[in-house]
Amino acid sequence: MPSLRRRPLPLVATSIAIALATLAGCGGGKAAREDESGITAYSCRLGGEHVVVRLETDEVRLLMPTGDRVILYRIPSGPGVRYSNGTYELTAKGAELTLVENGAARKLEGCELIPQAH
């Protein structure tokens, strides 16, 4: 029977968490932290609109400005981190996060950690 315990974040997801934490830290000294489930969430701006980025073990979940929920899965990458579902792709190189939709790249800006309720 498979274990029901969540695995720790893999290096790739940790890299995205660090990149987002760097962005969040620029806006008020907030440190990144995970809740007990290993999930970290951030509120960002995408072209002036609000988007929520939720980091889970092997995937990233986005809540788009339209209300659509998008799941991106980790894929192999050179330098940086990359998640995709074929339509959307999220890349992180250091503190620079970019969301690509159907070939059009847009940077995520002003990302702040969302406190997790316990």
Image (cartoon, helix red, strand yellow):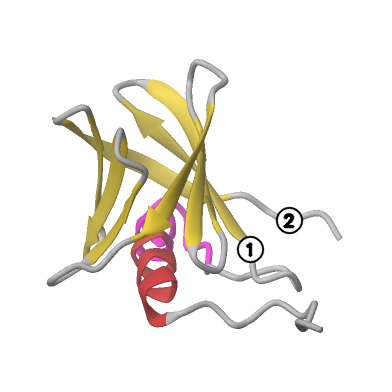
Q: Are marks 2 and 1 in contact (CB under 8 Å)?
A: yes
Residue 11 drawn above or below residue 15:
below
Q: Which image quadrant is residue 18 in?
A: bottom left
What is the span of residues highlighted in magenta in the rendered image?
21-31
Q: Is residue 78 left or right of residue 13?
A: left
What secondary structure is found at the residue carrying circle 1? loop
Residue at 19% over, 67% down: 77
114 part of magenta stretch: no
- Quickly name the residue at label 1: 39
Q: Quadrant of the C terminus?
A: bottom right
Q: Earlier in the sequence, mark 2 or mark 1?
A: 1
Residue at 39% over, 81% down: 11
Residue flagged by tag 1: what amino acid is it?
Ile
Residue at 37% over, 64% down: 16
What secondary structure is found at the residue carrying circle 2? loop
Residue flagged by tag 2: what amino acid is it?
Gln
